[in-house]
Image (cartoon, grey):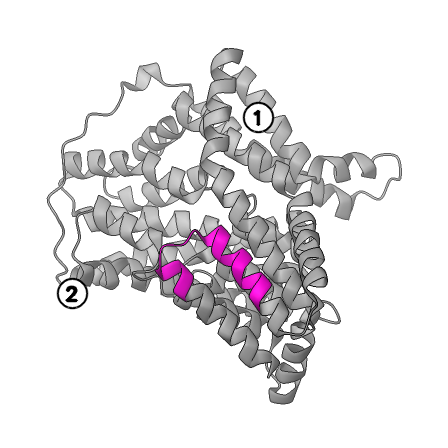
Amino acid sequence: MTLLIVLFGLLLLLVLIVKKISPMLALLIVSIVTGLLLGMSPGKVMTTIASGIGSTLGSMVMVLALGAMLGKLIEESGSSKKIVFILIRLFGIKNIQWAILLTGLLVGIPLFYNAGFVVLVPLIFAIASTTRLPLLYLALPMAASLSVTHGFLPPHPGPLAIASIFKADVGIILIYGLILTIPVAIAGGIILPRIILKNNLSAVSPLEFLPEEEKLLPSGFRSFITALLPVFLIIAGTAGTFFIRSEAIQPLFVFMADPTVALLTAVLLSIIILKIPIAKAMDYSADGLKGVAMIILIIAAGGAFKQVLIDSGVGDTVKEFSARFDLSPLFLGWLIAALIRVTLGSATVAGLTAAGIVLPLVGSGVSAELMVLSIGAGSLMFSHVNDAGFWMFKEYFNLSLKQTFGTWTIMESLVSVLGLLGVLLINQFL
């Protein structure tokens, strides 16, 4: 009966989102209804919702805010465009897909998916108009790289929020995530488009685009440093805590690996390195925060739903169910996230909801960090008409629905399945 009530809650969430209700409001409504149906008192439901919001946002709201600020500073300064120009020059036209893939990974780490997509799309058109290569041949490497960073790498909202729920180490997630990201992105962004183009999938005519003069952009060194600084700090701090056992020095590495510290340091140094006037930097930062405000509220509401599922004992029911059928917890986490993603469309909502359901499975031999990545992979599965990313890809590149399903949806599904296989492979070596 418990699982049927949860299923009803998910169906109600789907109906509300289909009716164009804000995901934040939909999640709050479903949290209340599901809690009451599961036998919780009204007072307990509201206390649980408040607890879920606080526990979810408490450890990550500043990370999301600082990540948005850093991304906007990098975008407005022209650093992301400079990275593109350098990589194209290094790789050459023959290997242009690899240049775009690496650009997407570098830009995708500090920028949220939508921001990275908007920043890179004009450059894809510029490359297409210059090289006369098919647009999809260039668009899929960009989309694949942005998708894997969105699903696997903090400080993106999904992985970060799930890490907070599982109390997982963000530095370890970043290391494992980078191990997964490169081969999965290559499969989805390099190999897949070459197969698709062999099947004679037509591409639209590229548009003319004149990029900014490269001389007006920041230097390559400053661009790369600012984009990769938070990743470097988190990985260096995490590695230091593993390999350096000195009681005097280790706290410094723990401090460095903290995502809030890493991103705050990156924001402050970016303003200095990129020579952005303080007033402009604060304006850019405010714009970045506006872009992430709704994401934060959705994550907060997702945290509320997660807590209702936990406090009502749904997780224990799922634990018994998985034990009965001898399912791998990592596979189960991926499967639940994938089913919710296909049903609801939002990768972030899918990840948060799945995390609340499978939380009791974490621990006792199951790596919290790998569970984060498994759910992150599941949250990318089979993007279709209920996902904003589907429509962004379709409209920006002027594709038909059939072409979008045949490119974007296949790419997202491939990334999801390969992500799961990669997680299971890493788990064999732990």
Work out which residue is located at the far bottom of the displayed protein and give it: 324
Magenta segment range?
Answer: 15-33
Q: Which residue occupies 43% across, 57% down?
A: 346
Q: Give the image quarter of residue 58.
A: top right
The secondary element bearing badge 1 is classed as: helix
Residue 78 lies, with reference to residue 109, above or below; the image says above
- Location of residue 124 in the rendering, given as x and y in whole percent from the top left corner: 25, 39
Q: Give the image quarter of residue 236.
A: top right
Residue located beneath label 2 in the image: 199
Q: Nearer the viewer, residue 57 or 143?
A: 57
Task: State the CA–CA distance, disc 1 to disc 2.
Answer: 45 Å
Based on the picture, tell me whether residue 58 belongs to the magenta stretch: no
Relative placement, left or right, of 201 versus 181 is: left
The secondary element bearing badge 2 is classed as: loop
Based on the picture, tell me whether residue 26 belongs to the magenta stretch: yes
Residue located beneath label 1 in the image: 267
Tag 2 or tag 1, which sits nearer the N-term? 2
Q: Is residue 141 visible?
A: yes
Residue 298 lies, with reference to residue 364, above or below; the image says above
Circle 1: is it few (<14), some (14-19), or many (20+) Cα within 10 Å? many
Q: Which residue occupies 68% across, 63% down?
A: 42
- Location of residue 162 in the rendering, given as x and y in whole percent from the top left corner: 60, 56
Q: Amino acid at mark 2?
A: Asn
User: Which quadrant holds the C terminus?
Assistant: bottom right
Q: Nearer the viewer, residue 39 or 197?
A: 39
Q: Which residue occupies 45% across, 35% down?
A: 291
